[in-house]
Amino acid sequence: MGSRSELAAAVLLGLGYPCVLLAALIPNLGFFAVAAAVTYAADRFLHMRGSYLVNRLQKVRAGLSIRFLVRQLLLILLVARLDLADRIIFYVMLGGFLVFYALQVFHGALVTLIRLRRTMPVATRNVDLSALRIPDAPPARLLRRSGEKMLHLDLPAVAGLIVAAWTGDYLYGYLGVGLTLGLGLLYVAALALNLRRRRRVPAAATVLAAVDDWLRGYQPTVVLYFSGSKESAYQVNMWLETMEQIDGKPLIILRERGIASQLAPTAVPVICVPGGTHLMNMDLSTVRVALYAANVGKNIHLLRVPTMKHVFIGHGDSDKLASVNPYSKAYDEVWTAGRAGRDRYALADVGVRDEDIVEVGRPQLAPIQLWSGTPKNPIPTVLYAPTWEGWDDNPGNTSLLLAGENIVRRLLAAERPVRVIYKPHPFTGIRDRKAKDVHERVTAMLAEATAARQTEPRWTEAAEAVRSEQSAARAELARIEARLAELDAPARVGGDEAERSRTSLADQRGLDEAKRLRGEWNDAFWRSFGYWEHRVVTGPEPKLYDCFNQSDAMVSDISSVVSDFIASGKPYAVTDSAQLGVEEFKRQNTAVRAAVVLSNSAVELDELLTAVADPAADRQARDRTELKRYLLGPDEPTSMEQFNAATRNLAEKATARNESVEQRLTEPEGAAPPDDSAPSAEPEVNDLDSPVRG
């Protein structure tokens, strides 16, 4: 249910309806009124909290509309059982509820029509669509949770009829039914006004033509293409800063509206194109290079375009099977961080040729700070960052299920105290309820351990010493969050996707200020609590790399998290949850070669903690340095410089290919083929920003 309060509300809802039925059958007017009020309140609470139960009830055909209808039918039964079936009030009640139901039908149809006529074939950000004159969205109060609002208009009728039956004065019933119908008519009329032509967005063809006009003016040269569920938004968000620094004119193309709403702030133009046909007809003739962060079926809609070169860049470097997906051979090139990625494809033998692999480093790793060799605080901080359970039941996917509690328990019981930062994967628990249960137990363990430290003299003295600093940090957090909320706030409250596409042009000054403020927020966040306090970090902030920089060591699983952490040079441990054995585990997983390998019991954690406390006892230090270069490439030139060089080189290949095709197409029919023995000039290579003419 998500919380104890939601569970209590669900229990009340489950008991409330049988009580309403019983009260109607007895009949008992007071009992009915109380039970009905409980169902109203519980329903409202669960909807406001977005409870999982609400969705489940909808799946079993006990959705909100049905629950309201059942309550109204039981009220009719109650009135009939009170021997009022031959009174006018009974027929007024029947007619009133029937008319109210008809109004609900009109209401639902109008809401659907408004949303359809306000939906454009694309959603954009940082794209100038002012020429379209997109009208303002309807008032948010009309469309937000509109179904609930309409259904709750039955309250005057239900209350009036109950009072009428209680007092015998039927005027209350007539007034209640009239008020319900009157409010319903007003709501429907207000919605109907928003169907006027001037409230609609332009036709799909007009919108797509405007986007093509903008594309021809902007002339994008490098596209980052992404498709996926809203939970996978982090996979595209990690590339935003790279796209902002890329040589050429960048463009981001998304395929799902849910991803667009999850996209982090960026100055790069963004076009979300849900329809495959619309994408395939879009004018992308100037694009030289297309970058793909995930292997998904919808990639084919852009892969079919021959005038650009296609590159798989992925969303992390790891030894998972996803890093050597056979789908990768569909691309012109595969870019890896370092030599390790190249070797993985060679060993996997999935059809990716060695000459099509380019090592470009990992530009995203620039914020990761190098280890100084000693803990930042009086006690070390250990980050536990397990990956999620995956789509299969492989025990090696995540340490959380078999080893998570052991890892945290041993860290909490370490002879020399440590602080634990626990940052689980965003997908944790979405497929396997057991993983979510372990996550909740680990969270509870850390909360209990933090509370226990608050009573120990050592930590209470430390807390007293930094109390004023923490208060200042919390005040600073509040100030920064308030300013960030102002910067993130839309120009007009209630604007829909179409209106946001009209107004969401990049404010570079605002973006720069927000970036600076987020850096200040991160600093204040870590100062707002003690260096001895354990922390559970979920959600987008603080970021994973911020947790890296606060940590002196890490425990994780086979995932890109390990490869990224290696950039810091700090000690780390990886859990062999599948129990392959140390030698086999290291043989199969490159990133483990300089790690402390943990069994599911986590008894080996002492070696990691010793390496953190005493650099002289760190047996893996040299191995980590060598492994870092192998996995992530050299420090010089920088990853961004390598990435840009690879982009320019591939853009030149795309230009040469397009000019060659154009030359062949313009040659007279029947012309003799060129003499291969004669010397030929190298094809002219255009600059990255010049358009493709083929």
Image (cartoon, rainbow, N blue to C red):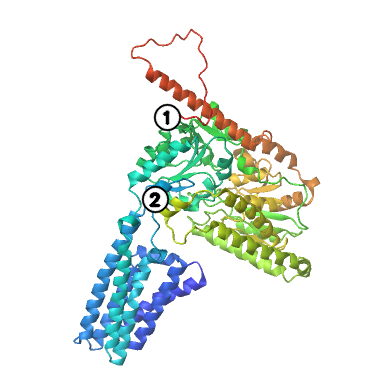
Of pointers 1 and 2, the one earlier in the residue sequence: 2
Residue 324 at what x, y percent from top left? 52, 37
122 w.r.t. 104: above or below = above
Q: Which mark is residue 462?
A: none
Q: Position of residue 195 (x, y in %)?
A: 31, 59
| SS for dot 1 | loop
Which residue position holds label 2? 133
Q: Report the side of 684 relative to 36 (left or right).
A: right
Image quadrant in which you'd find residue 278 = top left
Q: CA distance from mark 1 to mark 2?
A: 35 Å
In this view, the mark in front (1 or 2): 2
Residue position marked by numbered label 1 in the rendering: 306
Task: Pick whichever, 428 or 415, lies toward us.
Answer: 428
Residue located at (79% from left, 50% from top):
614
Mark 2 element type: loop
Identity, as a three-letter code, of the amino acid under mark 2: Arg
**Could you tell me residue 84's position as x and y percent?**
23, 87
Residue at 27% x, 73% y is 100
Residue 652 placed where, x, y %? Answer: 52, 26
Q: Residue at x 69, y 45 (%)?
A: 568
Tell me if 680 is positioned left or right of 443 in this view: left
The reply to whether the C-beta atoms of the residues labelled 1 and 2 are less than 8 Å apart is no
- Residue toward you, 437 or 645: 645
